[in-house]
Amino acid sequence: MNGHQRVQDDEGSAARLLALSDGVFAIAMTLLALDITLPDGLDPAGFRQALGDVMPNVWAYGLSFVVIAAFWRGHHQIFRYAREVDGTVIRIGLLCLGLIALMPFPTTLLAEYGDLPQSVAVYSGAVAAVGAAQLALTVVMWKRPWLGSTPLPDPVARNDVADLASTVLVFAVAVPLAFVSPTGAKLWWAVLIPVKSMTGRRGKRLRAAAQQLGAQ
């Protein structure tokens, strides 16, 4: 089959894995907001103080929501043409979901102790770990075209790999950088904004070209 040997270990439906994934992503996103609360019965001065105190939680929530949403979107792109999954895909997929489910914990650390290097390092490491798991999942699905209805075009796959590799690299570098300067490490995350913009535009062009080629 196109020079590939079909893997037969524990195959199943990609739709079932995606359904589980959607649930895990949704729960993780919801748990992010649990720390955003204010005490009852505050006077105006206490309310203003409490509102100011909770803003780091709001900032951390917004950051992690964007991060998890980006991983969710990437997760669906990985399985866009998949019909089946094998044991390797299931194991890596579950690892990715386990790391996503853990994200509320480093988010809380970042919100409560964002000025400490350990908190920034843990958060950076957590995002790098999720990115590495999703990168592995992308490569595995790319190299198993028999699992999908349509093989993932090599240019699209390479762009997706570069996109995830940039996430892993930036957040991995931020881990040691956090012990030099926690603020500097958080500013370093912003490097991903232009990188993601570039890979995102390129990915759209490559996917559109692949669809046009497939329609011919």
Image (spheres, rainbow, N blue to C red):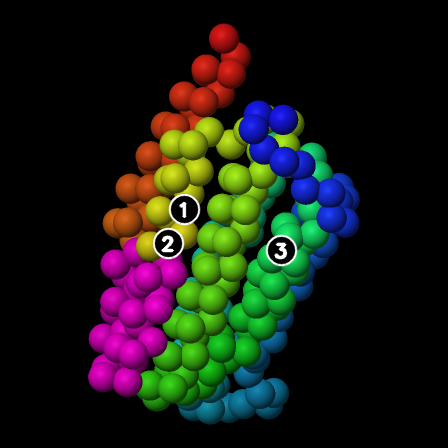
Q: Which residues are magenta?
A: 167-192
**Residue 194 falls left or right of residue 80:** left
- Residue where numbered disc 3 is placed: 93
Q: Does residue 26 show up?
A: no
- Residue where numbered disc 1 is placed: 161
Q: Is residue 165 magenta?
A: no
**Residue 152 falls left or right of residue 93:** left
Q: Residue at x 43, y 79 (%)?
A: 122
Q: Residue at x 34, y 76 (%)?
A: 175
- Nearer to the camera, 138 or 100: 138
- Distance from disc 3 to disc 2, alpha carbons, whole Å, reads 17 Å
Please tell me whether mark 3 sits on a helix, a strand or a loop.
helix
Above or below — where is 107 with respect to 62?
below
Above or below — where is 58 with respect to 11?
below
- Quarter of the picture containing the N terminus is top right
At label 1, counting other C-alpha atoms closer than 10 Å, the crowd grade (few under 14, some 14-19, many 20 or more) is some
